[in-house]
Image (cartoon, rainbow, N blue to C red):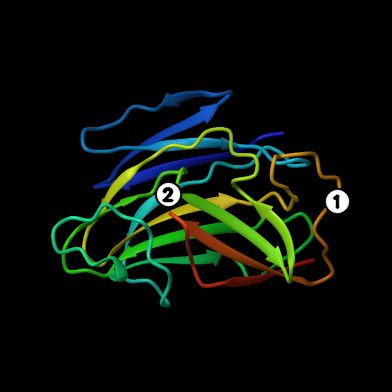
Amino acid sequence: MVLLLVIAVVVGGFAAVSNALGGATTSAAQPTGTQAAGTQESGAGAEPSDQASASASPGASDSPSATPGAAAGDGCEQNLVTVTAATDKPSYDAGEKPMLTLKVTNNNKVPCEVNMGTSQMEYMITSGSDRIFSSKDCQAEATDLMKTIAPGKSETANFPWQRNRTVQGCEAVEAKPGTDGAYYVFTARLAGKTSPKAVFQLY
């Protein structure tokens, strides 16, 4: 089964999308000035996912967070480029799939260039000391995507988690995450930096 992560970057009303499927990359029409990159991810016991997307959005991050690796422009301070993690809901009923969001915000007064490619991203889910899921475990292709983020603006990348377990090496895993109100922690990573924790429940 395949989990598909597609990053769609929205700039000035234009959108460009590309995805990696079966090891090949295909792209939709790209208006001048837009870029996109994607990666295929597969997880044992997973079902094909809905498309995930990334888009530009205004505003600063909601809380302090780790600084992503960035090829910054002149005057761009790395400690003012932040990463946060969020889920679309605080809890999920049986069958509902959490949408995981990685958000990068430029709190500088100048534009900053950040690598928002899947080569830099990781969506990690844990429960206590139990490592439940990592988007890196079954990632088939990693790509770079340099994005220039304007002052006070953000880029977000969404990933629909299939409520499956994965292990390093992408070996088959039959066990499923627990439910009945169990708590889970989502952390988003970019270039080795980790966001604050986002806690949610599964029923």
Q: Is residue 88 visible?
A: no
> Badge 2 local density, few (<14 within 10 Å), some, or many (20+)?
many
Under circle 2, the secondary element is strand
Residue 143 % position (x, y) = 43, 37
Judged by depth in the image, the label closer to the viewer, 1 or 2, is 1
> Badge 1 local density, few (<14 within 10 Å), some, or many (20+)?
few
Under circle 1, the secondary element is loop
For residue 73, side relative to residue 46 (left or right): left
Residue visible at 74% across and 68% down in the picture: 129
Q: Which mark is on residue 54? A: 2
| Quarter where residue 62 is shown | bottom left
Nearer to the camera, 162 or 31: 162
Residue 34 % position (x, y) = 27, 38
Q: CA distance from mark 1 to mark 2?
A: 30 Å
Residue visible at 65% across and 60% down in the picture: 125
Residue 86 % position (x, y) = 53, 66
Residue extending farthest to the bottom is 63
Nearer to the camera, 13 or 128: 128
Quarter of the image that includes the C terminus? bottom right
Quarter of the image that includes the N terminus? top right
Compared to 21, does 161 lie above or below?
below
Q: Are marks 1 and 2 in contact (CB under 8 Å)?
A: no
Residue visible at 56% across and 34% down in the picture: 40
Residue 193 % position (x, y) = 46, 62
Q: Which residue is mark 1?
A: 175
For residue 8, side relative to residue 175 (left or right): left
Amino acid type, label 2: Ala
Q: Is residue 11 visible?
A: yes
First of labels 1, 2 by sequence position:
2
